[in-house]
Amino acid sequence: MRWADLPRDLLHVVYAKVSGPLHRVRFAAVCTSWRHAATRPRYAAPPALPWHISSFGGRRDRTKRLYRPEDGEDLSIRVPSVAVLRRFVGAHDGGWVAALTLKHVRLVLVNLFSSAEVPLSVNQRKFAPASSDGPWAIRKIVFSREPTSSGCVLAALDCSSQVALCRFGDDDGWIIITAQERSRFADIAFCKGKLYGLTTDEELDRFDFDITNKHDGATSVRLLSVRRAPQAYNIYPFNLNDPPYGHYLFDLGDNLVMARTWSHRYNKPLFEVFKIVYDRQGNTHQWAEVTSLGDYALFLGETCSRAVRVPADGRGQVERNCIYSANHATSTRQRNGTIKVAHVSHNGMWIIPPRV
């Protein structure tokens, strides 16, 4: 029997075992029948796993090295010219990144793989942080949906704990939101289309905003309110004598989840994961510890955190119920020992490549 004559069901089994987009492209290049098996909806590629890249686009030769944890290999790519000498502060599925110039705070949204750009208005390209640290004052930018969609809203978090909003097509630029006096924002994330802010004292704010269509076809974003859910402090899992030094807010299976890191002896950070639990009225919330990630692998980073479902036998070298940290150069472990922790690198960020 020739390779091209293998049954489609068998090809599906083989394709499901192929790890990494690069190897799946090679699979599809074998012959017509293999390419047909790889591109049919029934045999669709699994969700893309994040890749690690340096967050500083400082090399003038445009070459950057990506690390793929799925197969443990490095890949060199040529980034678009507009991404050179810029700092990456956010990422979205499909290879999109938010990048800021180093000398002047100018924002671009570019796809590292296709070189496509999202057009921004003059006011949207300008981001004026409260401090004078330029792009280093911008900690993170998150996307509400696909950047090429008309309803995409950007949310930015800077080091002064301000959150700013803008929507594509809005010439009015950014709307600045300041945290309440008693707290500072540690992270922001979209979940089910809603924007949430996590404060350093682990309280949760929800930003309600309205998107208005103008007569000329443009749109604007208007902030309606910032609502803080009362917290049940009787189970508040926070040690004031030894506060955590890192907080991450992300979406795990349509549930809002927080991860935090603690300093520990021998300079080994500890990881804890909590999910949000509301009372029956949907008001008071509490953080309930998550002792297992189940089918998910968690990729933590300062500018992009992502939970991805992983099959029981793993995705190459990526295992389920494991945290992959991009921010710690020392060895790491999880507090209760039930969730594995793997160190990837430091001084970088996660990006989500195109699904192949």
Image: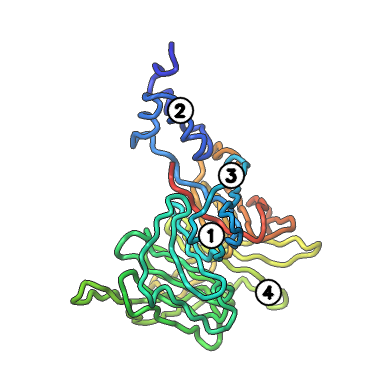
Q: Which residue is mark 4?
A: 243
Q: Residues within 10 Å of mark 2 (few under 14, many from 20)?
A: few
Is the C-beta separation of discs 1 and 4 under 8 Å?
no
- The residue beneath circle 2 is 13
Q: CA distance from mark 1 to mark 4?
A: 21 Å
Q: Residues within 10 Å of mark 3 (few under 14, many from 20)?
A: few
Distance from the alpha carbon under mark 1 to that under mark 3: 21 Å
Left or right of 249: which side holds 120?
left
> Disc 2 residue type?
Val
Q: Residue at x 54, y 63 (%)?
A: 88
Q: Earlier in the sequence, mark 1 or mark 3?
A: 3
Q: Quadrant of the N terminus?
A: top left
Residue bearing mark 1: 305
Mark 4 or mark 3: whose residue is earlier in sequence: 3
Kind of residue at disc 1: Ser
Q: Is residue 225 left or right of residue 205?
A: left
